[in-house]
Image: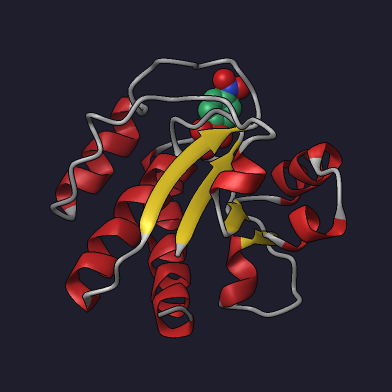
């Protein structure tokens, strides 16, 4: 299973999602290939936000070596699943899809926990530490469901 996590900047939510799912997959013995990207090019080449790195460190997951990149249309072929953090990311990715097969790979990550509710993982970039804690908790719930669902 090849899974791509996508947010806007690829420095807060999607690198956290990548780290959390990789950690849980390893513990569950699942052989996933996991990566992350941003729909924007604002932070290409940058490490994750310091607050994201610190939050993850608290839970013993090191994401400091990750570097931001932008989502490209080639990702539709490289991955089986493309998981958007919020509805805006979801719409932006879908707009780049060129056929139904590509569109079907794109899902809102929180729908694994709350099916069909189309909830977003809130962007923590302009807020405080509690935003990052909330993101961590939501992504743990989603990662557990993803691991239950895919071999
Ligand atoms: P992310 O958070 O999409 O979770 O990585 C953001 C990071 C940067 C910006 C917005 C959201 N920004 O506007 O620079």
Quarter of the image with the C terminus in it: bottom left
In the rendered structure, the answer to whether residue 119 lies left or right of residue 13 reads right
Q: Quadrant of the N terminus?
A: bottom left
Rendered position, 50 above or below 6: above
Q: Residue at x 60, y 51 (%)?
A: 85
Q: What residue is at 47 percent from the left and 74 percent from the top?
A: 146
Q: Is residue 107 above or below residue 129?
A: below
Relative to residue 35, is residue 100 depicted above or below?
below
**Does residue 39 appear to the left or right of 104 in the view shown?**
left
x%, y% of residue 68? 44, 25
Q: Quadrant of residue 51?
A: top left
Q: Of all residues shown, which one is farthest toward the left?
A: 60
Query: Which residue ends up furthest to the bottom in the rendered image?
Result: 148
Q: Residue at x 43, y 36 (%)?
A: 128
- Quadrant containing ligand 1 reads top right
Residue in the foreground of this view, choosing between 149 and 142: 149
In terms of depth relative to the viewer, which is nearer, 55 or 151? 151
Q: How is the image coloured?
A: secondary structure
Left or right: 105 as drawn, with respect to 35: right
């Amino acid at each position: 299973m090849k899974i791509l996590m996508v947010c806007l900047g690829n420095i807060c939510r999607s690198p956290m999602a990548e780290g959390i799912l990789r950690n849980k997959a390893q513990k569950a013995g699942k052989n996933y290939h996991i990566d992350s990207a941003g729909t924007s090019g604002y932070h290409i080449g940058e490490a994750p936000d310091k607050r994201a790195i610190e939050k993850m460190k608290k839970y013993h997951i090191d994401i400091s070596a990750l570097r931001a990149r932008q989502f490209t249309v080639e990702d539709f072929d490289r991955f089986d699943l493309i998981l958007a953090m919020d509805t805006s990311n979801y719409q932006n990715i879908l707009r780049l899809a060129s056929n139904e097969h590509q569109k079907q790979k794109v899902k809102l990550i929180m729908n694994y926990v709350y099916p069909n509710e189309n909830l977003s993982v809130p962007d923590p970039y302009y807020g405080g530490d509690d935003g990052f804690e909330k993101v961590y908790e939501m992504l743990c719930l989603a990662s557990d469901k993803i691991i239950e669902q895919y071999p």
